[in-house]
Image: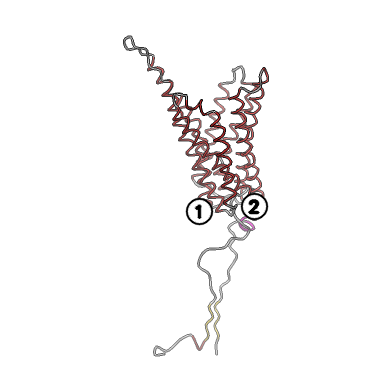
């Protein structure tokens, strides 16, 4: 009796050194993952943004307050550049992220787009103001020229709401990508955190509701406030998911810890932003101490916000979302076939 055994060696397939999640990322090793068009576009956009901000800072160099706030503008520009570069950093730290976790890459790309739209909204508002005010100088008969202030405010609010909607979409897709990466906190915890943010924001805005409603563009004010509350709740959900992933010890641990630090900074920014707005509404402390208190809150809030984007950039570069050390391979299994000599063939009539 002859026994024929067909065997095939299965060599280990490691697309990344030490397996997925085993190292900090190919960006810090000899293997450099090729960037897709999303990564290259984010690099080009970040360079253009830095050049534009540098030109603006140099143009304002002769102002009376430029020396005291120049470093604040530089820090804000670097933080925005880090947010724009986040998609490229994610592709470097997580090879094939567009195929493995497209939601995570989409969320970061949308957040980067929202940062890029900030100067675009300002430029469009300024150009619209120049056009409308030039038209208002034309006097027809004895009628006074029209005042375009309300039109400009409504236009600026519409553009700003559109940018906030892009930010909201970015946070939602980022949450979905983080959930797919393995960080799945209890839904009750996420809902409680989101409701807490909405309740605090609503209580704060209700306290100053007469000022919002009495304005001529109260509809735009209310819409802006509601959209801002929704965006804040979505960002809080992403922060909770990041902190939960670090608590569970997901790999790479460095990436999730950096993400948790970024989430803590985001929560601190939200608290300081509320304190700054409250200080402006109530007038701060009486006397000459009012301005320093307001500026201190603004500086701390801006610095922490930029620190959060830098930490998130570092988390992406470290391989955020790459998963555990061993990943289940989805696909057809390879089998071993054993054929015995007397059982290989059967008669047709059998």
Q: Is residue 339 above or below residue 226?
A: below
Q: Residue 148: which disc?
A: none
Q: Secondary structure at mark 1?
A: helix
- How many numbered discs, if any? 2
- First in sequence: mark 1 or mark 2? 1
Place of residue 238 in the rendered image (x, y in percent of width and height, measured from the top left):
57, 45
Q: Quadrant of the N terminus?
A: bottom right
Circle 1/circle 2 CB separation < 8 Å:
no
Residue toward you, 145 or 53: 145
In the drawing, what numbered circle is on residue 252? 2
Give the residues drawn in magenta, as a range: 17-21
Q: Position of residue 22 (x, y in %)?
A: 65, 56
Mark 1 Cα within 10 Å, few/some/many (few <14, many 20+)? few
- Residue at the (58%, 69%) spot, across then down: 10
**Residue at position x 49%, y 27% in the image:** 212
Q: How is the image coloured?
A: secondary structure
Picture quarter with the C terminus: bottom left
Find residue 337 and report its horizontal and vertical position in percent. 53, 78
Q: Which one is nearer the viewer's eye here, 164 or 322?
A: 164
Predominant SS of the magenta segment: loop
**Residue pointed to by mark 1:** 99
Relative to residue 347, is residue 210 drawn left or right? right
CA distance separating discs 1 and 2: 19 Å
Q: Nearer the viewer, residue 293 or 7?
A: 293
Q: Taking 29 as reference, is 97 left or right?
A: left
- Local packing at callout 2 (Cα closer than 10 Å; few below 14, some 14-19, many 20+) is many
344 or 247, nearer to the observer: 247
Q: Where's residue 246, x and y in %?
A: 65, 50
- Height in image: 291 above or below 205? above
Indicate whether residue 250 is drawn in magenta.
no
Q: Residue at x 59, y 18 (%)?
A: 63
């Amino acid at each position: 009796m002859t026994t024929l055994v067909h065997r095939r060696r299965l060599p280990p397939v490691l697309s990344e050194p030490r397996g997925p999640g085993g190292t900090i990322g190919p960006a810090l090793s000899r293997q450099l993952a090729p960037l897709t068009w999303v990564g290259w576009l984010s690099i080009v956009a970040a360079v253009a943004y830095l050049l534009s901000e540098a030109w603006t800072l140099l143009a304002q160099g002769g102002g009376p307050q430029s020396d005291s706030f120049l470093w604040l503008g530089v820090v804000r520009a670097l933080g925005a550049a880090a947010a724009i570069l986040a998609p490229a950093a994610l592709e470097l730290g997580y090879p094939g992220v567009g195929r493995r976790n497209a939601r995570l890459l989409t969320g970061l790309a949308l957040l980067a787009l929202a940062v890029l739209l900030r100067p675009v909204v300002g430029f469009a508002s300024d150009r619209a103001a120049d056009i409308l005010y030039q038209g208002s100088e034309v006097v027809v008969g004895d009628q006074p020229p029209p005042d375009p202030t309300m039109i400009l405010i409504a236009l600026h609010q519409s553009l700003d709401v559109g940018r906030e909607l892009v930010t909201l979409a970015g946070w939602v897709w980022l949450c979905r990508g983080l959930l797919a990466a393995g960080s799945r906190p209890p839904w009750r915890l996420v809902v409680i955190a989101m409701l807490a943010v909405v309740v605090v924001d609503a209580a704060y805005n209700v306290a100053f509701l007469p000022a919002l409603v009495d304005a001529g563009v109260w509809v735009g004010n209310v819409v802006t406030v509601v959209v801002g509350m929704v965006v804040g709740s979505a960002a809080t959900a992403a922060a909770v998911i990041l902190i939960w992933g670090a608590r569970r010890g997901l790999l790479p641990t460095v990436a999730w810890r950096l993400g948790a630090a970024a989430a803590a900074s985001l929560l601190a920014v939200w608290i300081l932003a509320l304190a700054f707005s409250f200080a402006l509404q109530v007038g701060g402390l009486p006397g000459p101490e009012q301005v320093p208190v307001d500026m201190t809150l603004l500086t701390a809030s801006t610095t922490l916000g930029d620190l959060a984007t830098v930490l998130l950039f570092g988390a992406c570069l470290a391989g955020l979302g790459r998963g555990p050390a061993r990943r289940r391979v989805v696909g057809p299994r390879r089998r071993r076939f054993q054929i015995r000599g007397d059982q290989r063939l059967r008669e047709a009539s059998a």
